Image (cartoon, helix red, strand yellow):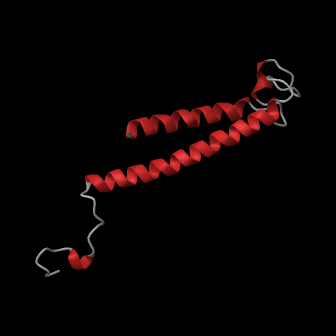
Amino acid sequence: MGIFLMVLLLLTALFLILLVLVQRGKGGGLSGAFGGMGGQSAFGTKAGSTFMWVTFGVVAFWILLCVFSVWYFSHSRLDRMGGSAPATSSESTPDGEG
C-alpha cells in the first residue's frame, strides 16, 4: 500500500506540474512556445476557466493525498515499533531504578 501511495502521489504531482505549464498566463503560457499565438489559448476560449477548475481539483486531491500519506506512514511506523508511544524517562528501566 505504501508503494502505491507514493507512486500515486508522484504521478499526481507530475500531472499538476504539466497542467500548470499548459495554462495560459499573462505571457501566453507554454502554448505560445509551440507556435501558438501568445494571447490565445491552445485549447479554445473557454479553456482558461476549465483548466482553472481542473487545477483546483487536482490540487485538492494532491493535498488530501499528502495528508493521508503522512497519517498512513506515521501509523505504519508505530506498528513496526510495537504500536506504543515512546517511553518516558520514568519508564526507561524495567526495574524502576532510573
4 horizontally vs 18: left or right: left
- Residue at the left extreme, as displayed: 95
Residue 87 position, x and y percent, is: 26, 70
Query: What residue lies at 46% left-to-right and 34% top-to-bottom?
Result: 7
Q: Quadrant of residue 58?
A: top right
> What quarter of the picture does the C terminus occupy?
bottom left
- Residue at the bottom extreme, as displayed: 97
Query: What residue lies at 89% left-to-right and 28% top-to-bottom?
Result: 39
Residue 82 position, x and y percent, is: 24, 58
Query: What residue lies at 77% left-to-right and 23% top-to-bottom?
Result: 33
45 horizontally vs 57: left or right: right
Which residue is nearer to you in this view: 58 or 86?
58
Q: Quadrant of residue 78?
A: bottom left
Query: What residue lies at 83% left-to-right and 30% top-to-bottom?
Result: 28
> What quarter of the picture does the N terminus occupy?
top left
- Residue at the right extreme, as displayed: 39
Numbered disc total? 0
Residue 66 position, x and y percent, is: 52, 47
Residue 22 position, x and y percent, is: 73, 29
Which residue is nearer to you in this view: 41 or 64?
64
In the image, residue 91 sits, relative to residue 24, either above or below, namely below
In the image, residue 8 sits, relative to residue 94, either above or below, namely above
